[in-house]
Image (tube, helix red, strand yellow):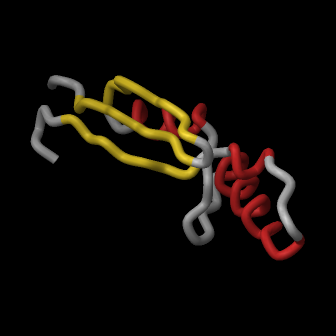
Amino acid sequence: MHPNGIYFGVLGNENVFNKKLSKSQLLLKYQFLLNDKFGIKIGHPFTSRKRIKKLFTKKYFDVLALEDFDNNTLVVVKKKEV
């Protein structure tokens, strides 16, 4: 990323957690809980908007937009000027 650039990303969100999942998809719920509540990442877990915002602002970014589209969240951040 350019020092003052903008980052666009699409991340899975907690909407998957809130849906009724089959038994074979329960792993998604456990991945979400471990990642979002305990910070333990297994595979490619979904995460909450709150945690997404926290992760980016912790790393010196300004969050410009967080928009949900079904099971995904569009993330737009800009690196803070130093």
**Residue beneath the point at 36% across and 46% down:** 9
- In the image, taking residue 12 as reference, residue 35 lies left or right, namely right
The image shows residue 3 at horizontal and vertical percentages of: 11, 38
From this viewpoint, which residue is outermost toward the bottom? 24
**Residue beneath the point at 68% across and 45% down:** 14
From this viewpoint, which residue is outermost toward the front? 70
- In the image, taking residue 39 as reference, residue 77 lies left or right, namely left
Task: Please determine whether, in this image, residue 32 is positioned above or below residue 80.
Answer: below
The image shows residue 63 at horizontal and vertical percentages of: 38, 26
In the image, 36 versus 66, the foreground residue is 66
**Residue beneath the point at 30% across and 42% down:** 8
In the image, 53 versus 38, the foreground residue is 53
Task: Please determine whether, in this image, residue 36 is positioned above or below residue 60.
Answer: below
- In the image, taking residue 51 as reference, residue 11 lies left or right, namely left
In the image, 58 versus 69, the foreground residue is 69
Q: Image quadrant of residue 51? A: top right
Q: Image quadrant of residue 48? A: top right
From the image, which quarter does the C terminus lie in?
A: top left
The image shows residue 61 at horizontal and vertical percentages of: 31, 31
Task: Please determine whether, in this image, residue 24 is positioned above or below residue 8.
Answer: below
**Residue beneath the point at 54% across and 39% down:** 69
Task: Please determine whether, in this image, residue 3 is positioned above or below residue 10.
Answer: above
